[in-house]
Image (cartoon, rainbow, N blue to C red):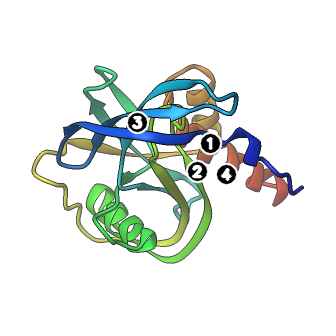
Amino acid sequence: MTQNVDHLIEKQLNSETIYEGKFITLTVQTVELPNGKQATREVIQHPGAVTVLAITAEDKILLVNQFRKATNRTLLETPAGKLEPGEDPLTSAKRELEEETGYQAAQWKHLSSFYTSPGFADELMHSYVATDLTLLKQNLDEDEFLDVLHVTADEAEAMVLDGRIADAKTVALVYWWLRERQREGK
């Protein structure tokens, strides 16, 4: 379905950088709304990220348990990470899978690319499925501490339903996996 949405576009009139960090920039923008009035938008600019649904030969997925300061709790997540400047998303996905879990995959499939929080951030996340895994060696960044779990479909679904998996990208990938397994008759 193609639809003309030009009448919804907000015209940027002004942009001021408030904060520039290692991988995010916060800007405050003045925009002209479709009705001609002005509004302020606070926008986090992010280089983009990847996430990987890694499926083992035993039909389990790899999750990482990692403390996230922004939520002040440990979250179960699919392996993920930010893109380096100019980096191809698949290259990043391969790197993140190996760094965080110690696995390499022979087969890769791009699932989708989606905005994580478009109300205030431009982060575009690229999701992949990785199969035909080989265990090598985990190679965490020096500021990264996490545990790797191998989770069955039933366990993953229960974890989503009872809130142990509360990370949106992971919820989306778990449900994609459950749907695909159902289509395959598993």
What amino acid type should be assigned to the residue bearing mark 4?
Trp
Q: Would residue 135 be found to the left or right of residue 33 on screen?
A: left
Farthest residue in the bottom direction? Answer: 106
User: CA gap, disc 1 to disc 3?
Assistant: 24 Å
**Which residue is denoted by mark 1 in the rendering?**
172
Residue 54 visible, this orientation: no
User: CA gap, disc 4 to disc 3?
Assistant: 32 Å
**Which residue is denoted by mark 2 in the rendering?**
114
Q: Residue at x 35, y 55 (%)?
A: 47
User: CA gap, disc 2 to disc 3?
Assistant: 17 Å
For residue 43, the mark is 3
* Above or below: residue 58 compared with residue 178: below
Kindly indicate the quadrant of the structure image that contains residue 43.
top left
Residue 97 visible, this orientation: yes
Whichever of callouts 4 and 1 sits on the residue coming sooner in the sequence is 1
Nearer to the camera, 46 or 54: 46
Whichever of callouts 1 and 3 sits on the residue coming sooner in the sequence is 3
User: CA gap, disc 2 to disc 1?
Assistant: 11 Å
Whichever of callouts 2 and 3 sits on the residue coming sooner in the sequence is 3
Farthest residue in the front direction? Answer: 36
Q: Residue at x 28, y 20 (%)?
A: 72
Whichever of callouts 4 and 2 sits on the residue coming sooner in the sequence is 2
What amino acid type should be assigned to the residue bearing mark 1?
Ala
* Above or below: residue 185 compared with residue 57: above
Nearer to the camera, 97 or 46: 46
Structural crowding at the residue carrying mark 1, measured as other residues with C-alpha within 10 Å and reported as few (<14), some (14–19) or many (≥20): few
**Which residue is denoted by mark 4 in the rendering?**
177
Q: Residue at x 64, y 34 (%)?
A: 157
Kindly indicate the quadrant of the structure image that contains residue 136.
bottom left
Q: How many marks?
A: 4
Asked whether the beta carbons under mark 2 and mark 3 sit within 8 Å of each other, the answer is no
